[in-house]
Image: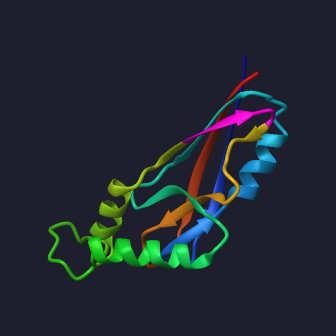
């Protein structure tokens, strides 16, 4: 059994979905593991991870619009110390996830044809987000 870990940084320019599938695929391919499990972990409470369609960009537009409706910035939240997007960002993270598990089969991630790995940035201003990768297998 072999294990590998890696940390990567994603720079965002504000709210939205940022695909980083190719970065993960390249790192996994260098690990020389044939069968295993990849964990992708986001080290933040105001950004999250999604596996989502990567062919049609309107999917990302509609996802962002949906989350803006269910966690609006103009609601009177108690927690607003970092601005009006602070608590909505935490709610969006709570409704999504900060960890993904992706099987590795025959040396490749078992993603479907149209699936991509995304960081979902919930804050308005730009951020640098840290993502940790952990691959275990043989």
What is the residue that sits farthest to the top in this orientation? 1
Above or below, 94 against 100 in this view is below
Q: Position of residue 5 (x, y in %)?
A: 68, 36
* Res. 1 image quadrant: top right
Name the colour scheme: rainbow
* Res. 3 image quadrant: top right
Q: Position of residue 128 (x, y in %)?
A: 57, 65
Q: Position of residue 107 (x, y in %)?
A: 80, 35
Magenta range is 101-107
- The quadrant of the image that shows the C terminus is top right
Residue 65 in the figure: left or right of residue 4: left
What is the residue that sits farthest to the bottom in this orientation? 74
Residue 138 belongs to the span the image colors magenta: no
Above or below, 73 against 6 in this view is below
Res 75 visible: yes
Residue at the image point whose x is 76% and y is 49% from the top? 25
Q: How many marks?
A: 0
Residue 120 in the figure: left or right of residue 131: left
Above or below, 73 against 27 in this view is below
Residue at the image point whose x is 46% and y is 77% from the top? 62
Res 126 visible: no
Above or below, 12 against 112 in this view is below
Residue 43 in the figure: left or right of residue 135: left
Residue 105 belongs to the span the image colors magenta: yes
Q: Residue 37 versus residue 86: which sits nearer the camera?
A: 37
Residue at the image point whose x is 45% and y is 71% from the top? 63
Q: Residue 111 versus residue 132: which sits nearer the camera?
A: 111
Q: Residue 106 versus residue 138: which sits nearer the camera?
A: 106
Residue at the image point whose x is 79% and y is 29% from the top? 33
* Res. 2 image quadrant: top right
Q: Main secondary structure of the magenta part?
A: strand
Q: Position of residue 29 (x, y in %)?
A: 83, 41
């Amino acid at each position: 059994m072999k294990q590998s870990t890696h940390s990567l940084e994603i720079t965002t320019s504000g709210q939205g979905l940022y695909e980083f599938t190719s970065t993960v695929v390249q790192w996994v391919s260098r690990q020389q593991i044939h069968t295993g499990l990849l964990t992708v972990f986001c080290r933040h409470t105001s950004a999250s991870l999604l596996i989502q369609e990567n062919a049609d960009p309107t999917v990302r537009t509609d996802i962002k619009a949906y989350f803006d409706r269910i966690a609006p910035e103009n609601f009177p939240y108690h927690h607003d110390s970092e601005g009006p997007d602070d608590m909505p960002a935490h709610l969006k993270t709570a409704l999504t996830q900060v960890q993904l598990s992706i099987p590795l089969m025959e040396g490749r991630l078992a993603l479907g044809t149209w699936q991509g790995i995304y960081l979902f940035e919930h804050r308005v201003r730009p951020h640098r987000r840290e993502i940790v990768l952990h691959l275990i297998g043989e």
